[in-house]
Amino acid sequence: MSPINFVYLASVLFAIGAATVLLRRNAIIAFMGVELMLNAANLALVAFSRMQGNVNGQIMAFFVMVVAAAEVVVGLAIIIAVFRARQTISLDEPAELKG
Amino acid sequence: MLSVSWLLIAVPLASFFFLLLAGRRADAWGHWVGVAASSVAAIVGLGAFFQLLGRDSAERFEAIRLYSWISGGELSVDFGLLLDPLSITFVLLITIVGTLIHIYSVAYMENDPRRRLFFAYLNLFIAAMLLLVTADSFLLLFVGWEGVGVASYLLIGFWNHKSEYATAANKAFVVNRVGDVGLIVAMGLMFAQFGSVGFADVLGGASGASEATLTAIGLALLLAATGKSAQFPLQSWLGDAMAGPTPVSALIHAATMVTAGVYLVVRAGAIYEGAPDARLVVAIVGAITLILGALIGTAKDDIKKALAASTMSQIGYMMLAAGLGPIGYAFAIFHLVTHGFFKAGMFLGAGSVMHGMNDQVDMRRFGALRTAMTVTWVTFGLGWLAILGIPPFSGFWSKDKIIEAAFVGEGWQPWVFGLTALIGAGITAFYMSRLFFMTFHGKARWTDEQHPHESPLLMTVPMIVLAVGSAFLGLFLGLGNRFQHWLQPVVGEHAHHEPVLSVPVITTLTLVLVVLGAGAAYLMYWRREVPTEAPPPSLGTLLARNDFFQDAVNRGVFQTPGTHLTRTLVYADAAIIDGAVNKQATGVAAFGEASRRFQSGKVRSYALLMLLGFVVLAAILVVGS
């Protein structure tokens, strides 16, 4: 099977993730969309690695995973803090900094 | 004493600071510190005078360089004193008359709670005035010039709880500043031309400068002199300056400070030497003021204001003499000295009258004070004879010389100046006799609560000393032209010229006019009853009584247009300069207002924008490749 199919799959997954982020109001769901986008990118990196015949892309994918793990910790903590403060995790609700 | 002549300035200045800082505990004896400081200055001055007198006339000067004061690139000015016959003459006048007036003030200001402060200011004045006359550069002279201005301001407004007195002080200050501009401009021109503002460089190099430059410097100096000496057209402040306590009027506004303008013109003689036009303007200013002051003097009922008008007029004589050139310099200073004595004496006499009459100044409420205040009457009378120029009293020796000198020359000038001085002498006799008769003779017109009495010894003794000076100083200095020879090293020699009328004719004419003036005053203000209310004035009296509407003229010509000008400038500043800056700020604010709409606070729309940006970038990359 040609590696290019993995790239197509990654594109579809990225589009789904982006649509989730843009369309859903719930912060947890939007967060999951972000994770989906990150993993789509990982998939694309690994596919490119295979296509190029070297391991650069795979190493990059490991980095992304580590960063994503850290980002999940921080992101969830923020979501919990927001929920504690205002009993909602709607993304549209906190808008104090708008101009 | 010459080597320590800096003490002249240092001692009164130290006393000023001491009295200012000593506080209430010095209230009981502070005034004696002031008197002592002035006396020390007088002793140092006398010592320096006798030391100079002991030398040959060509070596009668002493330049004392104290330290380098300003050293900035091309301009370097030393703090140095110059003691020569001219400055020593002033030093003696200032310190001796000053000390007498200090003593007088001890009694005059006895009931004033701020007497210590009064003496502090008097000492400040003495220090500044001595600096003015002993400075060896125009810049240092300017320091003294401003110092006496400040002292004058403080003392005119000494009773500043009355708002019109405070206004009078402000007026004097502001008018003097107008004159000061002239001195600053003159110094600038000197620096541009000679690269220095020292007397030695400027006056020594004056002969090498062009006439146009010298004329400009001369006119600028004249502006300064008119301000300080209350000469036309800056004469308006002197009458109001009488708001100050009477000793101040005697010391500052009669004997010393107001004559500083004459000193300046005589000191800058070398400049006027090369600028005949500027010199002519000096003489014209003097002649105008002489007549103007005399006419104002005829109509004033306030004894101090009448004396102030007289001062103006007499300084006009000095200016006229100074404007005549080397022939007049010595007489200008001679008259300045004798005037310093008799006018200070008369002011102290007026103060004594006020002291005995509950501070009344309206001469229509005086009369017949001769018996009640005999000492004042005699001393004032001697001053009156002196200013009239009756021989052998002081004024005869100095004023008649000026009148004679005014008649010297060619063309129209001797006739105009000579006749002006002559007529001025007649008017002087009239208004001074009017003042004298209204105060001391005729019927008593006192109000019920006035009980005239002679003043205490502390006041009468200085008056007696000054009266002796009024009587004999002219004779002593005038005989054998002693004073002229004394001043010769400074003002130079001049060839003798015959006046256009012969001297005996001039003297006789002067005396006739003086007797006519005094006689008219005798008939009008001694023989005839003087009404206690001023009668409705004729046009002439109205003009003179209102100082020829000098304030209205100043207001119309300078103040109102000046106000409009500044208002226009303020408006233009707000509209154009501030407007440009404000427009910029408004523009930035509008830009911010427009761009803040992008900060919606909606996270998802941010994300959408980011995505769109990414897509656009990607599209560019794809299309670009």
Image: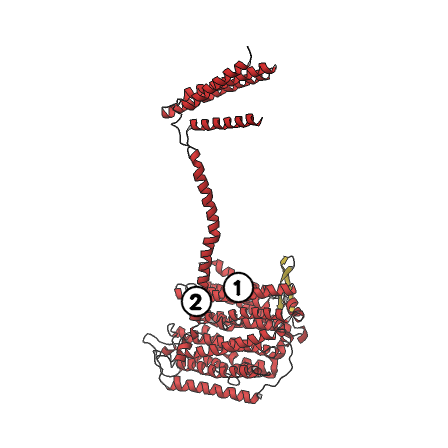
Label 2 sits on residue: B168
Q: Position of residue B391 (x, y in %)?
A: 52, 85
For numbered disc 2, what is the local secondary structure?
A: helix
Location of the C terminus of chain B (image quadrant): top right
Q: Disc 1: which chain?
A: B
Q: Quadrant of residue B278?
A: bottom right
Location of the N terminus of chain B (image quadrant): bottom right
Mark 1 Cα shell of 10 Å, populated few (<14), some (14-19), many (≥20): many
- Mark 2: which amino acid? Ala
Q: Position of residue B251 (x, y in %)?
A: 49, 71
Q: Is residue B140 left or right of residue B21?
A: right
Q: Is residue B152 above or below residue B327?
A: above
Q: Is residue B6 visible?
A: no
Q: Are marks 2 and 1 in contact (CB under 8 Å)?
A: no
Query: Between residues B159 and B50, which one lies in front from this camera angle?
Result: B159
Q: Quadrant of residue B479?
A: bottom right
Query: Between residues B132 and B61, which one lies in front from this camera angle?
Result: B132
Residue for point 46% across, 28% down: B609
Label 1 sits on residue: B147
